[in-house]
Amino acid sequence: MAYLVWLIALSVVILPVQAQEVLRFKAWKDYIDPAVLENFQQETGIRVDYQTFTTAEELDQALVRGEHIDVLVPSHFQLAGLIANKRLQALDFRQLPHYASVDPELLAMLAALNSANRYVVPYLWGTVGLAVNPRLAEPAFGRALPNSWSLLFDERDSASLEGCGIGWLDAPEETLSLWLNYRGKNLGRSSEGQISRAGRSLLELGRRTRSLDNERYIEDLSSGRLCVAMAWVGHALTAAKANPSLQFLIPQEGALVFIDSLAIPANAPHPELAYRFIDYLLQPENSVRNSLATQFYSPLSSGAPELVKLAKEQPMLVPDQRERRRLYFLEKLSVEQKQAVDRLWQGVKQSRTAVP
């Protein structure tokens, strides 16, 4: 009997234990509602290894190195290169039941980028617009503020606001594109000489900025150190949580749009898990929760009940059709144009008055 008990005990010890399935998810920092992540893990038993990157180049390099990633979040401007280099799998939409909830307009925009809609689905999107604090800016401006890039790019208007704090993003291509668009021109169709000549005016405007960065300006907006700033929508709305006086505007001349999407790398170890995770994120209630957590826009169709409800409760998180018609993608630049922009931007940074 003792021998039999020993054999039973031994069999229990050596029985193989099934390892927990692990999905590797690579995205920007704080780019998902932690509760959505936790719920997915509890409901499926799949552990999510959430890895982050701080620049698009880091993600590109990870794919070049052949890192094993199941789901990643590239930005729209990366897609042409990723597709051309066969870094992404074409998606089987039959495995994404909630794909029907995605906004057709966003899909059409992706389709224009090397048919990227075959490889990705929108996750979150947003704009580069104006963050404005009317309580501080209007007294300095002396009248009602226009919904215009003139607040940053007009000589007289920006001079009026210099005292209450002007901020630009440290984003050379975006800034130059918006400035030229304000002047009725197009960065993508500008020669090196035109970019250099255009920069002379931009240098003077840059000297008036109190802030030229991509992170600290969020706190500067919250604290009132800046009254008008170029901003990514998620950052502007995050600052507005702490400072209700802040507004985010899509100026009448137009603003830049970006789309971050969900994709499965060509070498993904667990594509079957990837489809389950992507479809979970596309569920309307989860999409809205991620929008609320990150303060970037949900990719749901405008008629989705969840988005209609969100528009009533958080109107700044759902741009209307008039605003959406003013959005455009950053232009694609040649190597020579990019070099001219970078030279110009170094001049802008060097010419700024030092800020204590």
Image (tube, grey):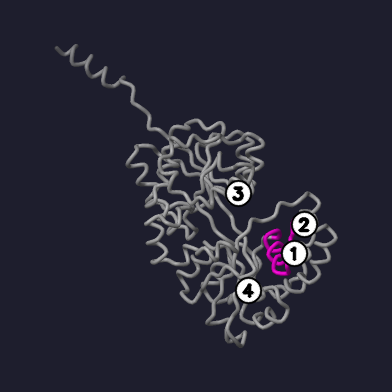
Residue 81 shows up from this direction: yes
Q: Earlier in the sequence, mark 2 or mark 3?
A: 3
Residue 248 position within the rendered picture, expressed as x and y whole percent measured from the top left: 53, 69
Label whose residue precedes the other's in the sequence (4 or 3):
3
What is the spatial separation of the Cα atoms under label 2 and label 4, in whole angstroms? 23 Å
What mark, if any, has residue 76 been given in the picture? Answer: 3
**In the image shown, does 270 or 2 lie closer to the viewer?**
270
Q: Amino acid at mark 2?
A: Arg
The secondary element bearing badge 1 is classed as: loop
Q: Residue at label 4?
A: 148
Judging depth in this view, the residue of 295 and 316 nearest the camera is 316
Q: Secondary structure at mark 2?
A: helix
Q: Amino acid at mark 3?
A: His
**258 lies left or right of 338:** left
**Label 1 near label 2: C-beta < 8 Å?**
yes
Q: Quadrant of residue 19?
A: top left
Q: CA distance from mark 1 to mark 3?
A: 23 Å
SS at circle 4: loop
Amino acid type at circle 4 is Ser
Label number found at residue 185: 1
Q: Residue at x 50, y 36 (%)?
A: 70
Q: Quadrant of the C terminus?
A: bottom right
Task: Say which label, 1 or 3, has the lower sequence index.
Answer: 3
Q: Label 3's element?
A: helix
Q: CA distance from mark 4 to mark 3?
A: 26 Å
Task: Characterize the magenta stretch by its predominant secondary structure.
Answer: helix
* Residue underneath mark 2: 189
Magenta part of the chain: 172-188
